[in-house]
Structure formats: structure tokens, C-alpha cells
Amino acid sequence: MIFQILKFDHITPALIDLHWLPVTFRVQFKLLLFVYKLLRNQSPPYIKDLLSLKPATNYALHSSAQSLLFVPKANCSSLWDRAFANAAPVLWNSLPLTIRTSSSLAIFKRQLKTFLFRKAFSLFQ
């Protein structure tokens, strides 16, 4: 109605104009927002048991100060890939350090949406 597109027209240009994320990226946004709140003690404590930071090593590694999450190993792949305990650390660790270490929730949300928007529509711009 707003953009007067036909039933079978592609929706991508409308999503770009409205600055909306596609559904898969919106799910990632919500999941990463949940992880950010969890790491800042702004979520229920019973969920905190599902995630843990990577353990410290005896070596002075560059990655030790990057607030990465531990990704548990599993034998099965299809269902485990979608479980919160696996999907959240994988997505979190794939974020740039500047987004993971945002100082406030508002800054994190803005940077995350911009990052996911560019990732979703990089082929169309």
C-alpha cells in the first residue's frame, strides 16, 4: 500500500527504504540483544547458565580481551546449530569487537542494526 508495489514484486527495495531487517536478520538481532543483556546482568539469572565466556589461558593471547563466548562442541549438527547455547555464542563471536564492547544498550542496538543491515543488503547496494 505504501510503496504501491504489485503482489509479485520484490520486497527488498521496500525493506531498504524502510530500513527494516529481513526476518532471519531480525531473529539474529533479537538473539544478540538478549546475549548483550545477559552479559551485562540485565536478564534472568537462570539463562546465564547457558552461556559462558571463553576460559582464560596461561598465554597472553590477543583474543583473551575480546569478550568471546565459549562455543560447546556437539556430535549432531542440524538441531544443535539452532539451539540457543550454540547459536548465541557463534553469532556473538562473529560480531566486530567494537559492537561487542559497546558501552550502553542504545549504542549496542544502533551499531548492531547497522551491521546487520549492511550484511543483509550488501548485494543490493
Image (cartoon, rainbow, N blue to C red):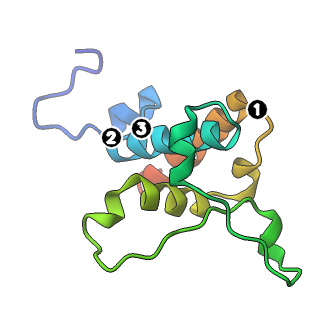
* Amino acid of disc 3: Leu
Q: Quadrant of residue 87?
A: bottom left
Residue at point 34%, 31% (across, down): 14
Horizontal side of 5 relative to 31 (left or right) equals left
The mark that comes first in sequence, 1 or 2, is 2
Does 66 sit above or below residue 17? below
Give me the disc on residue 21.
3
Residue at disc 1, secondary structure: loop
* Amino acid of disc 1: Ser
Horizontal side of 71 relative to 65 (left or right) equals left
Residue 44 placed where, x, y %? 55, 32
Does 107 sit above or below residue 75? above
Q: What residue sits right under mark 2 in the picture? A: 23
Q: What residue sits right under mark 1 in the picture? A: 104
Q: Are marks 1 and 2 in contact (CB under 8 Å)?
A: no
Residue at point 71%, 70% (across, down): 55
Label 1 and label 2: CA atoms lie apart by: 25 Å
Residue at point 29%, 15% (across, down): 2
Residue at point 83%, 79% (across, down): 61
Label 3 and label 2: CA atoms lie apart by: 6 Å
Q: Quadrant of residue 9?
A: top left
Q: Are marks 3 and 2 in contact (CB under 8 Å)?
A: yes
Residue 97 placed where, x, y %? 74, 58
